[in-house]
Amino acid sequence: MTDRESARERILEAACDLIAAEGIDDVRIARVAMRARASTALVHHYFSTREELLEQALLHSFEKVGEERFAATGGEAPDATAALAEAIEECLPSPGPMERDWVLWVELWLRAAREPDLRPFAASLYARYHDWLEEVLKRGIDSGEFTAPADLRALTDRTMALLDGLGLRALLHDPTMDIDAARAQVADFLAPQLGIDAAALLTQPA
Amino acid sequence: MSPRPSIDHIRRPQILAAAAEVIVERGVAGTRIADVAERCGVSPPALLYWFDSKEQLLAEALTVDDDRFYEELEARVDGAAAPGERMVALIETATESADDFALWMELWTWALRDADLRAARERFDARWRAAIEAIVIDGVATGEFGAADPAQAALAIAALIDGLSAQAALGDPEVTNPRLTETVLASAERLLGAELPAGAGGRASP
């Protein structure tokens, strides 16, 4: 990685941290620069407006998720059920880096709901997320491990919706449910539709 | 209880309707008390006399929206109707209009960082899930629904509606409102182990 790339990346990472901590609307360029150990001039060199920086920061966060997490998920899992269990894990806001990604995800929902210009971008991220999850399900269908659902696309969309609705509650520390409850719900929803045992999806990856 | 004199019963709904409009347009972050005051024709000090902050305006505007939802639901279906019919009316009422969804997204995002709004979200969600759960309990008791765990089924239905509404609000061309209603109905049938009656919209089979 060249110095130029790493400065840009540092700025984006700093922006993501601040968006997650304070909300997108409160992020100021000067604070991003300070956190990235860069000058505001350098920030402006890479991003002409504050809006551009914030949009690129969200994109950066989801691209990293795509590269590091989605791409690797299940690659080493012994079978499709284990790969699916791992994928479910990747979609829930466990404490740590996943929590930050989740906060950014919710910020993106809100922003895209308000700004039609951002919707194609949000829709493309959703499409990528969809394709990734559908691929995980397809692996098990192709190998004969899962029974094929009537409509794989629809099942994928519903699973994503359930993960988002439950993940949001877990992220907000809903007093009536946590990540474990979310995981169990998703397993109970998916297992009968794939002809597998829900318990098999609850086994923690080693 | 607030020590303040009770607000003019006409003024208060006007202020909250104006607050909802401004917040949907600009977001909580971009909303100023003065904007809301101007929209409803009161002075900013008068508005601040009754509402402490824009966070409070958001919570109260959502309370109005929420109450209206339950009134609409009651007007639509008799509480003594069969559980299946009530479930269809509830899902249709919740999914047919996405106009107010941006306001709920504001709540979710601000609940990440504001304790009062977090508590408000928990209250709204508890009421919502209890409404769904009550129908499931009746449906299981009458045998119209299969053996579902009412609290778990209510959580899954609520989570699905949130996740699918987010997909619709983000302008996913594949998730339109009629499609959203249909998808939730189909998922509810699976979760409840029941065939739900055709709704007011004369739904096509999923």
Image (cartoon, helix red, strand yellow):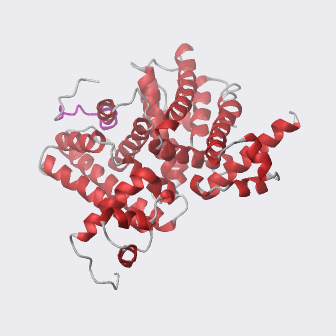
Please identify the residue farthest to the bottom as the structure is shown. Answer: B3
Name above or below for residue B79 compared with residue A128.
Answer: below
Range drawn in magenta: B187-199
In what quadrant of the picture does the C terminus of chain B appear? top left
Q: Position of residue A16 (x, y in %)?
A: 67, 48
Residue under the image location 14 percent in, 51 percent down: B75
Whether residue A33 is visible here, answered yes or no, is yes
Q: Is residue A126 above or below residue B155?
A: above
The quadrant holding residue A82 is top right
Q: Quadrant of the N terminus of chain B?
A: bottom left
Please check the rendered image and state whether residue B190 is part of the magenta-colored stretch, yes or no: yes
Residue B153: x %, y % from top left: 35, 44
Q: Is residue B140 magenta?
A: no
User: Which quadrant of the structure image shows residue B180?
Assistant: top left
Vertical order, B71 against A63 (above or below):
below
Q: How far across and down, in percent of the image, does residue B77 sit?
A: 14, 47
Task: Please tell me which residue is depicted at 49% across the width and 40% down the height of the picture.
Answer: A163
